[in-house]
Image (cartoon, rainbow, N blue to C red):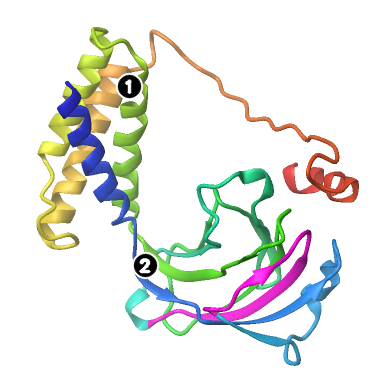
Amino acid sequence: MYFKIERIKRITTELESYIHVEKESIDEYKVKECSYGDLSLLEEDAENWDIFKGKERWGGLDKHFWFKTLVEIPKAYQDKSVIYEITTGREGQWDAINPQFLIYVNKKHVQELDANHNNILLTNSAKSGEVYEIELYAYAGMQENLVELNSNIAVLDKETEKLYYNIKVPLEIAELLDKEDKRRIDILNYLTKAINILDLRKPFNKEYYSTIKSSNEYLENEFYDKYCGNEDVVEICVGHTHIDVAWLTHISTTSSLPQYLS
């Protein structure tokens, strides 16, 4: 059973690497340091701002910055789903003191970004030559050291992404169940059958996509619809958050959070 789980995990790890593909790095931004909460710079022309190259570092204790750039959709992305993603080199470290961002696309506030939420969908149907204005209001975090600003656009392979989560979620549930629990055994059997369908020898070729689709259909029909169903247990989930006032942040920072969490 251990080797069955490890095999499924290895396949999901490989699938994860195929979700964001055809990556194009973003090598230059305009940057300006600012005070906390200075959203007026969203409207400021960045022509005279400093140039920030991809290999440079930024940050400092409790520092705030604006980064601006233009991203043009390559010809190869035509009609595909495209994402923007960013990392700072602090992924996997303590979230409470890591860098965070507000991201605006074409002057519209889209969402927040951090070590756990590092990408946004730009479009579901890209048009070659279309330009997106990317603007980041960046908070460096609660450490003196400098961090990276690694960013790129990429094609989002939705069918692969769907299969990744179709496998990953029940696998994590199975690992929480007792080793002799029949539900655990059943889940692992379904997942094993699903990955046995796959042909990953040449990612992104015709056979790859055909088997990705077939594996998704098998799980959705045989596992999620027939085996899981919705008769035994129906769960209603409600998301929530909490805010620790002035814990590793200033009170002014804490007081501004509800507008982004609502």
Which sits in the foreground, 210 or 3? 3
Residue drawn at 36 percent across, 22 percent down: 173
Q: Quadrant of the N terminus?
A: top left
Distance from Cα at disc 2 to Cα at disc 1: 35 Å
Left or right: where 225 falls relative to 51: left
Q: Quadrant of residue 172?
A: top left
Q: Which residue is mark 2?
A: 80
Q: Quadrant of residue 90?
A: bottom right
The type of residue carrying mark 2 is Lys
Q: Considering only vertical position in the picture, is 184 above or below 76? A: above
Please provide the residue range marked out in magenta. Answer: 54-74
- Residue 175: mark in rendering: 1
Residue drawn at 78 percent across, 44 percent down: 248
Q: Considering only vertical position in the picture, is 248 above or below 62? A: above
Residue drawn at 62 percent across, 45 percent down: 95
The type of residue carrying mark 1 is Glu
Answer few, some or many: residues within 10 Å of disc 1's Cα (few below 14, many 20 plus, some between 14 and 19): few
